[in-house]
Amino acid sequence: MSVDEVLLDSEERMEKAIGVLKHALSGIRTGRATPGLVDSVRVEAYGSQSPLKQLASIAAPESNQLVIRPYDTGTIKEIEKAIVASDLGLNPQNDGKIIRINIPPLSTDVRKKMVSRIKELAEEAKISIRSIRRDANKVIETAEKEKEISEDDRDKMKEEVQELTKKYESEATEVAKTREADVMEE
């Protein structure tokens, strides 16, 4: 792997770590209803586990309500069962054609727990980013030992990897802070 490839690969992997963080945070409940709340729900339908969004359209017509419209009304019972079985604490109401979920307001304790979970997820992303930095530095060290690059190049590249690390760690922090503010919003 060439030196430029190391930097590109590191940046790509760090970008993916941020993407994973954003996806994980989208499933954390705020006081408002969002289709992301049920992203993690998997439904047993047609003989296999499928993500809910492949079986139904999900909308938030009001700030405290989700509406789920199955593409096939025959799957409505399975969808309802999957939502109840998920650990989201949601109570679906089925009228035969659509499922409505009223989102209750969050208590202060629940909000604080969610903020601590957001911080955990952000820290996991940062750990992942640091691991990517460590991998890149190993490749750079190996290249220098095998005389593919000079010591000056090695130091310059390590500095670039460190700058990438700082950039993506601060992005993880910002994404988490934004989500924390959403959760704490009354």
Image (cartoon, rainbow, N blue to C red):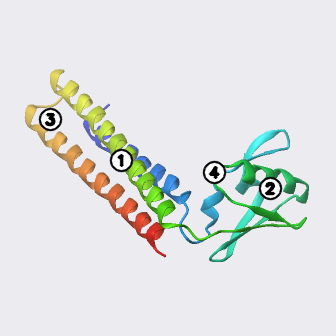
Mark 3 vs mark 2, CA separation in Å: 57 Å
Secondary structure found at label 1: helix
- Which badge, 2 or 4, is on the more N-terminal residue? 4
Instruction: State the residue at coordinates (25%, 36%).
Output: 3
3 or 4: mark nearer the eye: 4
Secondary structure found at label 4: loop
The amino acid type of the residue labelled 2 equals Glu
- Please say if the residues under marks 3 and 2 sit with CB atoms less than 8 Å apart: no
The amino acid type of the residue labelled 1 equals Glu
- Which badge, 3 or 2, is on the more N-terminal residue? 2
User: Which one is nearer the viewer's eye here, 93 or 19?
Assistant: 93
Mark 3 vs mark 4, CA separation in Å: 43 Å
Q: Which residue is mark 2?
A: 80
Answer with the quarter of the image where residue 44 lies: top right
Instruction: State the residue at coordinates (49%, 57%).
Output: 25
- Please say if the residues under marks 2 and 4 sit with CB atoms less than 8 Å apart: no
Residue 82 is situated, as x and y percent measured from the top left of the image, at 75, 49
2 or 4: mark nearer the eye: 2
- Which badge, 2 or 1, is on the more N-terminal residue? 2
Secondary structure found at label 3: helix
Q: Which residue is mark 4?
A: 40
- Which badge, 1 or 3, is on the more N-terminal residue? 1
The amino acid type of the residue labelled 4 equals Ser
Mark 1 vs mark 3, CA separation in Å: 28 Å
In the picture, the disc for residue 123 is 1
- Which badge, 4 or 1, is on the more N-terminal residue? 4
Q: Which residue is mark 3?
A: 154
- Which badge, 3 or 4, is on the more N-terminal residue? 4
The amino acid type of the residue labelled 3 equals Arg
Residue 103 is situated, as x and y percent measured from the top left of the image, at 65, 68
Secondary structure found at label 2: helix
Mark 2 vs mark 4, CA separation in Å: 14 Å
